[in-house]
Each structure stands twice: as C-alpha cells, then as structure tokens.
Image: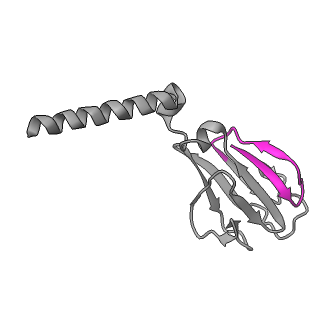
Amino acid sequence: MRLRIRRGPGAGTTIECERVRFSIGRSRANDIPLLGDWRVSRRHCEILRQGWHWILVDVGSTNGTCVNGRRVSGPTVLRHGDVITLGESEIEVLMAGEEFAGGGNPLRRAFGTAALVGMAVLNLAGLLLALQVWR
C-alpha cells in the first residue's frame, strides 16, 4: 500500500507502506509526521495490517479522523482510493495491484486469476456431478 499526501504538510509526497504498523501525527516521532498541521494530534492515528487488510485506528486524537468525509469511531478497513482526513491534511490510499484486485487473495497472488477461475469451474463441475448422482 502507498499513501499520497494530497493536502497539508508534505503535499505531493507518496509514502510506500512496507511495515505492518505505522503511526501518523504531528510529532517527529511518528512514522509519517505531519509537521505544522496544528489540528493534527501529536500521535493522531495508526494504520496496521491485519491479514490481507489495512486498518485505520484513531488513537484518541482531539479533532478526530475521517475516511471519505465520515468520522471514524472504531477500526476502519481502508480501500483503494479512500481519502483520510486529519486536521487540514488529506491522504489518499493507493493499494498495490494484488491488494486492489481481489483484496489480496493469497491464491490469486500465488497462481493468478486464471487459476482461480479454473478452480471455481472444477468445483462447480464437481457440485453438478454430485447433484446428478443424487437423482
């Protein structure tokens, strides 16, 4: 996953997210510091990887965190194209190909879409054959 800062400190910057968990906030101690945006808390939110999903969690910020204009009230699954707003800053979520196409399905990553379609057809054929036997 990549994050592109659209507005606020660091606008135009794209960040490659290779870690499992990282923090965003006004302090330099954060993995993604938004220095100078005074509406952003020192430690504002975290994004973490759980399985094949990226989850945004507001960690008790003063002014809250929004995804696509809606204030988050708990852990929120991020999707390709989502816009995270914190303070005056806007950050766009850009998923990698396998994350965007199919939610990062491990079989798709390992074998490709054609193999998954082939497996689905074989499963369907087996189901149809089983139904014929029961008649």
Can residue 33 be seen from the camera position used here?
no
Left or right, 127 with respect to 51, comes to left
Foreground residue among 58 and 10: 10
Query: Where does residue 85 sit, x and y in percent of width and height?
Result: 75, 65
Specify the farthest residue to the bottom: 63
Q: Is residue 3 magenta?
A: yes
Q: Is residue 10 magenta?
A: yes
Check the image and report above or below for 78 versus 116.
below
Q: Which of the 4 image quadrants contains residue 72?
A: bottom right
State which quarter of the image contains the C terminus: top left
State which quarter of the image contains the N terminus: top right
Query: Where does residue 7 sit, x and y in percent of width and height?
Result: 86, 60
Left or right, 134 with respect to 26, comes to left
Residue at screen point 27% across, 32% down: 125
Foreground residue among 20 and 107: 107
Query: Where does residue 9 sit, x and y in percent of width and height?
Result: 90, 58
Q: Over which residues does the magenta segment extend?
A: 1-21
Left or right, 70 with respect to 16, comes to left
Can residue 102 be seen from the camera position used here?
yes
Residue at screen point 73% across, 73% down: 62
Specify the farthest residue to the left: 135
Residue at screen point 59% across, 70% down: 73
Query: Where does residue 57 sit, x and y in percent of width and height?
Result: 62, 60
